[in-house]
Amino acid sequence: MKAKAKRPLSAESPKTAPSEVRDLEKRLAEALGQLQTRNRELAEAQEQQTATAEILRVISSSPTDVQPVFDMIVRSAVRLCDGLHSFMGRFDGELIHFAAQYNYTPEALQMVQRMYPRRPDRQQAAGRAILTGDVVNIADVQADSEYATDLAVAGGWGSILNVPMLREGKPIGTIGVTRRQAGRFSDAQADLLRTFADQAVIAIENVRLFKELQTRTEALSRSVSKLQALGEVGQAISSTLDLQTVLRTIVARATQLSDTDAGLIYEYDEPREIFLPRAAEHLEAEILEIMLATPVRKGEGVTGRLAERLEPVQLPDILEAPAESRVRSALVRAGYRALLALPLVREGNLLGGLTVIRKTTGAFAPEVIELLQTFAAQSVLAIQNARLFREIQEKSAALALASQHKSQFLANMSHELRTPLNAIIGVSEIMLEDARELDRPDEVKPLERVLRAGRHLLRLINDILDLSKIEAGKMELQLESFPLAPLLEETASTIATLAAANGNVLDVDCAADVGTIHADATRVRQALLNLASNAVKFTKDGRVTMTAARVAGGAGDTIVLRVSDTGIGMSQRRPPPRRRPSRARPRRGLVRPDATHDRSSSSTTMRRYAI
């Protein structure tokens, strides 16, 4: 079939056209504003994510010194909060100590160094954050009757935001950022500063844990040859952050180093006050089943007393244990005669217990107890490191999933926006041409603005689409069977106005036997529309042909869709396509105008589509 598009004549009077144009321009401006706002929010989120990742990189590269982390945080706080200065202090439970700053004037820096260390009070935002354990957001320091303004005057700021650094709900420091003008910081900026505070706590904890580990490793290096073996155990534990692997390693090495016959490691459930078996070494299945079925309660037996005493407990002869003990008879039947239990404690909190058992009676030697105590302390650090790593992994996975959802949404929406926008651009071009031919100068400039805005919005949507496709990594297809002929007619109707504007003849050649196709109708329509719209845009006073044909093959019939035109063809930088005898060239790749093409025409990015 063959259809030549005709330019429709406007039924509206010249007096009503400007009103419609202004209404269209207003809607386009609103849409553009919303898109720009979302782009800005996306850029800010990406910048914050980059800053967070950079701080985490510094944390991992500086395990013994928090100062590089603090310096990175205060610089990022000023940049991302549109601030003037940034301050970080550490709190030891009594005094606030100056830790880091960025962009302070020499006068203000001297005042800060004279002021700290100091007790927290309400005269400074840092003191208020420590005292309240909450965000302090002072919109106007001059209007705050409790705030001491001498430092603000020296530093030249009018507002300040301060966030406490909390560990287990207790303040251990503070981060603040100032701004020259008065005005409240946004909730988003406060949340960002909270994130920086959490990262600072992680850095402090990492350094503290690392230094504790260093201290104990140095002590072990000065001990006897048995303690050297303990150093090897610490190295084995540090080779993995998987918690279950760490627990199995702990009990295996503890049994080996203490020269005992079996071992068991528990995790203490503080709310229920029970010890839950987590990993065992050389322990009979019967005993393990009893412990799993009836966990040890607080105060029950040797292991249960760990929750009350938080110190090693031993039983030189298991036969001396109360006869009603649920595991006593099973241990005796297996030949065990002595037991030693050690608590796994961190900052006064019981995390679990380590129990070793042997088949000979007698008290455990003091050096064995000391060895296992040191090993238990190292094990606690390994458990904490594994838990911290698991928490970071979960948060990273959540961030990655959120980013993927965002990208998928943008990829889906961008295609849906381009089709009506192309129609708007085409109609605007026709109206602009009519205004010029009818000598209506008062309509030309508004129409030109609408056309420029539409083309700019189209470029933005194309950029978003490209970015989202890269991030999403795939396109999900909604497969269905649908007739192909109506789709070609719909596409031809959509681009008919644009084809007529360029003086082109638009042909649709659909074979009678083409029938239906099983594919994603939306993607096929978009691919065909992209190819056809580019063909009519880059062809002047020529012919554009859309063809659909069924081709038989060994693996079944294939439907071939082709768009050809008599326009400018492929760029010289790409290999030329296989030519047919006629002038028409199949469009199968990216089409770009050459130096002689009229670059004022609108264009959309064309991709290679396999249908």
Image (tube, rainbow, N blue to C red):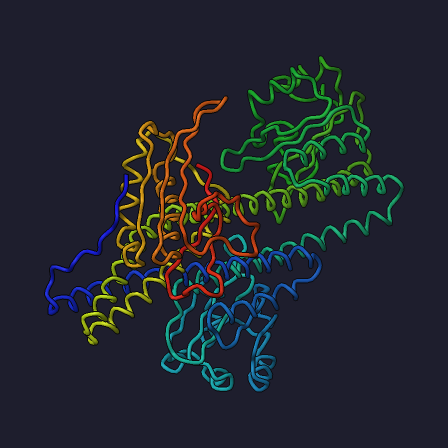
Please tell me whether residue 123 is drawn above or below residue 20 in the rendered image: below
Q: Report the residue at 61% width, 66% height from top.
A: 70
- Does residue 489 appear anywhere in the picture? yes
Q: Report the residue at 15% width, 60% height from top.
A: 10
Please tell me whether residue 387 is drawn above or below residue 215 in the rendered image: above
Horizontal side, residue 149 vs residue 547: left or right: right
The quadrant in which the N terminus is found is: top left
- Does residue 36 appear anywhere in the picture? no
Tell which residue pokes out farthest to the right in this image: 225
Horizontal side, residue 177 vs residue 137: left or right: right
Tell which residue pokes out farthest to the top in this image: 333
- In the foreground, 200 or 89: 200
x, y percentage for residue 519?
Answer: 39, 32
Q: Tell how many labels.
A: 0
The quadrant in which the C terminus is found is: top left
x, y percentage for residue 164?
Answer: 50, 63
x, y percentage for residue 202?
Answer: 59, 55
State which quadrant residue 514 falls in. Answer: top left
- In the foreground, 570 or 384: 570
- In the foreground, 289 or 550: 550
Q: Report the residue at 37% width, 60% height from top.
A: 602
- In the foreground, 160 or 208: 160
Q: Report the residue at 48% width, 43% height from top.
A: 580
State which quadrant residue 362 falls in. Answer: top right
Please tell me whether residue 197 is drawn above or below residue 100 in the rendered image: above
x, y percentage for residue 243?
Answer: 63, 37
State which quadrant residue 280 falls in. Answer: top right
